[in-house]
Amino acid sequence: MKQAFTIIAFLISLVLFAQKGQPYAPWATESMSKNNNTPSLEDVSAAAKNYFKTIDQNKKGSGLKPFERWRYHWGFFLDNEGKI
């Protein structure tokens, strides 16, 4: 019984710590830190452009397509200052 409890506690902690990771996308960390967590879409796009210059954009899994989808979607939900 004690061994089962130990195994279950270990698995639960493993699952909880597996969820912890990088809070933002790699291209968003720069713009989020500059603007106190409320960046404009232009700031994030500029940071993404700089990020995607450093990697192979044509490689599968580079993240370019999800970013472009994200940018297109949030382009409709901007305030007057262009913030998301």
Image: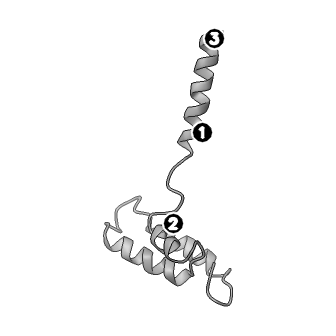
**Placement of 62 over or under 38, stated as above or below:** above
Q: Quadrant of residue 7?
A: top right
Q: Give residue 6's quadrant in the image.
A: top right
| Mark found first going from the N terminus, 3 or 1 | 3
Q: Which amino acid, mark 3?
A: Lys
To which residue does mark 1 refer?
16
Q: For the residue labelled by badge 3, is the local secondary structure a helix, a strand or a loop? A: helix
Residue at mark 2: 66
Q: In terms of depth relative to the viewer, which is nearer, 49 or 58?
A: 49
50 in relation to 7, above or below: below
Taking the spot 35% from the left edge, 68% from the top edge, the residue there is 57
- Residue 4, how many percent across, how many down? 62, 14
Marks 3 and 1, how far apart at CA: 21 Å
Residue density around tag 3, few if under 14, some if 14–19, many if 20 or more, within 10 Å: few
Quarter the N terminus occupies: top right
Q: Is residue 78 above or below residue 51?
A: below
Q: Where is residue 9 in the image (x, y as percent from the top left)?
A: 62, 25
Query: Mark 1: which amino acid?
Result: Leu
Label 3 belongs to which residue? 2
Q: Earlier in the sequence, mark 2 or mark 3?
A: 3
